[in-house]
Amino acid sequence: NAGVMQNPRHLVRRRGQEARLRCSPMKGHSHVYWYRQLPEEGLKFMVYLQKENIIDESGMPKERFSAEFPKEGPSILRIQQVVRGDSAAYFCASSPVSHYEQYFGPGTRLTVT
Amino acid sequence: DAKTTQPPSMDCAEGRAANLPCNHSTISGNEYVYWYRQIHSQGPQYIIHGLKNNETNEMASLIITEDRKSSTLILPHATLRDTAVYYCIVRGPSGSARQLTFGSGTQLTVLP
């Protein structure tokens, strides 16, 4: 049973470009969470999605960031016009039901040059 | 969700039990205690969770005090691969906030 998959594992973008991070949840999991970990800091919640719905985006920056979890395909975290401060590790987690334990992917390390 | 307090770091000799404490004095009656760990910038790994009773699985044991104000995660025979940051998280049941709130955790170093 494959775990949570994230790609790419490493992503380098220049300032002003767009970054797209993908997350495929575990089989049978319809709840996806995105977290960000800035260098030398703890993990911070960004957004919680169910299939085709954003349930909670209270941790998402108001501008440039968006997330989706379409009916078919992976969840996407999109960062437009990236800045150096966006450099971080972005982790995705999934669960079968919202209040169950969450299983994390290996993360995408975004570097903005 | 209740706030948790953990020591910033601990050492443990390889092969010995590692006992990681967590204080959660403001925990509510329906909130669970979860433990995760993060090994050197990898994705966090779920370890165990409990409500009132002590719990055990293939990875660890969780001991929750009777008043539920504190808990201890026990790794019975620590190995070098258990070196990681361990996070104690208190989380509400269904219907409350779904996200995990990570604090600073405890850096456990297992020494050879």
Image (cartoon, coloured by chain):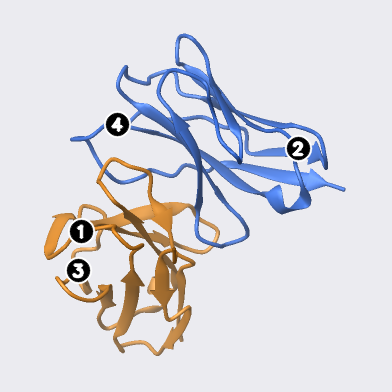
Query: Relative to residue B78, is residue A38 depicted above or below?
Result: below
Q: Which residue is mark 2?
A: B77
B79 and B39: which is toward the camera: B79
A33 and B50: which is toward the camera: B50
Query: Relative to residue B35, is residue A102 depicted above or below?
Result: below
Q: Which quarter of the rendered picture does the N terminus of chain A lie within?
A: bottom left
Callout 3, which amino acid? Phe
Nearest-to-viewer mark from 4 and 2: 2
Looking at the rendered structure, whether the residues under marks 1 and 4 are on a common chain is answered as no
Are the residues flagged by discs 1 and 3 in contact, CB closer than 8 Å? yes
Q: Earlier in the sequence, mark 4 or mark 2?
A: 2
Q: Which residue is mark 4?
A: B92
Residue A36 in percent (x, y) is at 39, 61
Give the image quarter of residue B24.
top left
Q: Which residue is mark 1?
A: A49
Nearest-to-viewer mark from 2 and 3: 2
Residue A106 in percent (x, y) is at 49, 67
For chain B, give the colour: blue
Badge 2 marks a residue whose secondary structure is: loop
Q: CA distance from mark 4 to mark 2?
A: 30 Å
Is residue A67 visible in the rendered structure shown here? Answer: yes
Callout 2, which amino acid? His
Which residue appears farthest toward the left when viewing the image?
A53
The chain to which mark 3 is attached is A
Q: Which residue is mark 3?
A: A69
Give the image quarter of residue A35.
bottom left
Is residue B83 visible in the rendered structure shown here? Answer: no
Chain given the colour orange:
A
Callout 4, which amino acid? Gly
